[in-house]
Amino acid sequence: MIRHFVAALMTMGLLAMGLRAQQPTAKTLVGIVGQSTADRAVDGGLSSIQVQASTDDSNAMVKAARTRSFTDPDDPTRALSTSWSLTASAPLSKGGDATALLSGDGFPDSFTLKTKYTRYLLSGRRRPDFDNPDVVKKRDVICEELILGAIKKGVSPEDAKGLECDTGNVKKFIPERLEDHNALFWDDDRSHYLWGGSATVGHRQFKYLETDLTEKSTSKTPWGVSVFGATVPRGMDTLLTGGFEYRSKQKDADEKTLCPQTAGASQLECKTGPIGAPVDADEQLVYVEMRRLMLSRAMSLKVTYNFETEKLGLDLPVYVIPSSDSGLAGGIRVGWLETEGAQIGVFVTSSFKLFPN
């Protein structure tokens, strides 16, 4: 199984080689390497709602996030950002043990709360030399094109003239000039780094049968922790992430049909269900992920190896509907597990602003 994992890593590396790009700020990271679903380690640091359904599970997630950006006082060429988020997830379907591939958080049948911290270390920040006429001219030309681009997209001339000439508006109204704009503020020959971790706690109710067909229930508290690191390598528009996750969880005992004989009964009474209390199903996972934009579609291939089962899993969300001005986006999610085979699902997500800038 290890050789499959290594082969997948090599494939991801080959896909990422040789791809040039402007380097992102915290605000443009998603614009450069693509969007991510709410369960990914590195996301855009925005509050969002996500609903997804697959062949094995359906769930809903609500994420509240707060991101702060500032300049490193010891290195003015490096911008720092920190992001805190709290995500609540709940299953939309009941019954059985859903395969925890497409849900990402690993607890598709449980209500969970997850808190996550992310630190962005974005190097190569430039202070444009606005005393240099050539720099000022380049900036002015881009800003003038921004106004014209906004007017062409329906913004009134008065409002267009009041737009900030920043990365967000350049990307929105004249995306073909984004690289030129960012080059004034960022050195595209520097690598960027991110790291962080998360903690998850949940609640799940189990129902099961005793051997005498007595129905019982019990509640369990699954939990998990994870750490991750990521980089946007120099000269590549690709985000590479690696991490480790531990999950302490339970699953239903094996399902059986029992027909105990009862003295004096004219016929047998049978019941089918999990026999006995839930059993432990802990997981220790290591994963790598490659995220990038291809043909204006965000793709995020994640390869996971489970040390408990010694099995490999793949997960690939693809944004078929890119994020619009309203923040609504969605796509198809394809997965594969050695133990379960292929899975397919769909997801819809919408971002919203919870905190003021």
Image (cartoon, helix red, strand yellow):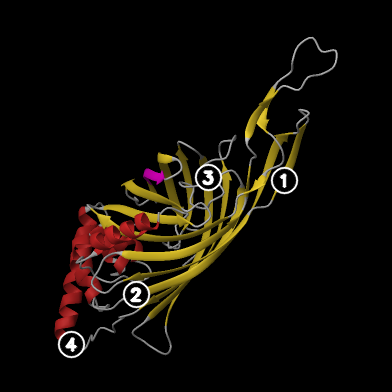
Report the number of discs. 4
Badge 2 amino acid: His
Query: Which tag is nearer the camera, tag 1 or tag 3?
Result: 1
Give the mark nearer the N terminus: 1 vs 2: 2
Q: Residue 117: in sight, yes or no?
A: no
Observer-nearest residue: 350 or 37? Answer: 37
Q: Residue at x 22, y 63 (%)?
A: 147
Q: What is the distance, in whole Å, between disc 4 and disc 2 at their CAs?
A: 28 Å
- Please name the residue that numbered disc 2 is placed on: 192
Q: What is the distance, in whole Å, between disc 3 and disc 4 at their CAs?
A: 52 Å
Q: What is the distance, in whole Å, between disc 1 and disc 2 at their CAs?
A: 43 Å
Q: Residue at x 52, y 45 (%)?
A: 60
Q: Position of residue 38 (x, y in %)?
A: 46, 54
Q: What is the distance, in whole Å, between disc 1 and disc 4 at their CAs?
A: 68 Å
The magenta segment is 330-337
Q: Main secondary structure of the magenta part?
A: strand
- Mark 2 secondary-structure assignment: strand
Give the mark nearer the N terminus: 3 vs 2: 3
Give the mark nearer the N terminus: 1 vs 4: 4
- Please name the residue that numbered disc 1 is placed on: 219
Query: Which tag is nearer the camera, tag 3 or tag 4?
Result: 3
Give the mark nearer the N terminus: 3 vs 4: 3
Q: What is the distance, in whole Å, between disc 3 and disc 2 at their CAs?
A: 32 Å
- Please name the residue that numbered disc 3 is placed on: 60
Query: Which tag is nearer the camera, tag 1 or tag 2?
Result: 1
Q: Residue 281: in sight, yes or no?
A: yes
- Please name the residue that numbered disc 4 is placed on: 132
Mark 3 touches mark 2? (CB < 8 Å): no
